[in-house]
Amino acid sequence: MLRVTRATWAAVALVLAAGAAACSSDDEASGGDPPGEAAAVEVTAADGPFATGWRTLELVDETRTTDAVPGRQPELPERTIEVEVFYPAEGEPAPEPTGEAFAEAAASTEDAPPAEGAFPLVVFGHGFGGRADHFRGLAERWAREGYVVALPWFPLSREGVSVFDLAAQPGDVSFVIDELTALPEDDPLAGHVDGERIAVGGHSLGAATTFAVAYNSCCRDDRIDATITVAGGTLPMEGGDYEDPPEVPMLLVHGARDQVVPVDVGDAMFEIFDPVWYLRPAEADHVTVFVGEEGRLFADAAVAFLDAHLEGDEAALEAFADEVAASGVAEWRTGP
């Protein structure tokens, strides 16, 4: 059941809004053609590990505009979203990565032929003033386990522009899903992205974007099957609310020493949403939640969570509690 009061929402909104203005420097240290036909063979994560490939796409949404940035650019008649895509590829898999999100994606081959089958899609967004390429190591790890991973560069909140653009970003995520699940038949990835198994996630403002596109009535995308929210929370969205969100499973991650978005926000999200699995590293802050032992735990939690909710391997997530306990660096809570 949903556990929420108007006071809770107000407190969360005030804290997160204050944190958004400060998270640029932290995130910089972090963060009309016919569709292709789905491949006949559906591959699961149990068939991995895979070699991994990557490519960059430039997606242009001609139905929405980009706000002007004073002194930098006029209003644009479209929204252009560059997306880095990592995917399972043909060939022998590279050695298992260390698991940290910020590790280099050194094992992936540009434009490698995709592995046979259709794979679940994961879209993961950077924070305010952040960079998509800071999450290449994370994307490579997920692709190795059998997922197509899209890392969008949001048009205005990215590094170098740093304009708060939350209102438009849920639409960006949905547009990325639209494009990757309906690639032209001559695209090498056509038929390799499973539009029936989709997760979205993000860090900081990327997490707020995830909350909006998955749970807010303003812009909810009902194709989303699971979410991963890191160091963020809900923010008010014009024309919508969170009063009756769908029961989309959530992996919630928040460092107890986060000084940008205090852990009280993560604790509140745990009380509000259902079902939710909460990884709460005791010594991690807004960025180090992705680094060292905490980063390895996050990477393992994400794979277990995705395997459980996109692949149906519930045992993977159930076993993760023992890994957290053995680490001694984090709490693992499940709700309600």
Image (cartoon, rainbow, N blue to C red):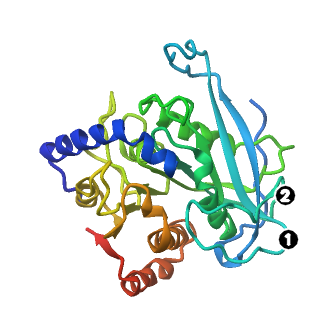
Q: Earlier in the sequence, mark 2 or mark 1?
A: 1
- Labels 2 & 1 near each other (Cβ < 8 A): yes
Give the residue at mark 2.
112
- Give whichever of 124, 283 is nearer the camera: 283
Residue under the point 28% across and 55% down: 269
Q: Is residue 264 above or below residue 307?
A: above
Between the residue at mark 2 and the residue at mark 1, the CA separation in whole angstroms equals: 9 Å
| Secondary element at image label 1 | loop
Left or right? Give the position of 196 relative to 108.
left
- Give whichever of 36, 238 is nearer the camera: 238
Residue under the point 31% across and 49% down: 261
Category of crowding for the residue at label 1, using alpha-carbon neighbours closer than 10 angstroms: few (below 14), some (14–19), many (at least 20):
few
Category of crowding for the residue at label 2, using alpha-carbon neighbours closer than 10 angstroms: few (below 14), some (14–19), many (at least 20):
some
Q: Is residue 42 above or below residue 79?
A: below
Residue under the point 50% across and 18% down: 69
Left or right? Give the position of 147 relative to 255.
right
Look at the image and tell me in which quarter the N terminus lies: bottom left
In the rendered structure, find residue 91 and report the number of the disc placed on it. Answer: 1
Q: Amino acid at mark 2?
A: Ala
What percent of the width, then of the height, locates residue 163? 46, 28
Residue under the point 15% across and 42% down: 6
Look at the image and tell me in which quarter the C terminus lies: bottom left
Residue 100 visible to the viewer: yes
- Give whichever of 59, 288 is nearer the camera: 288
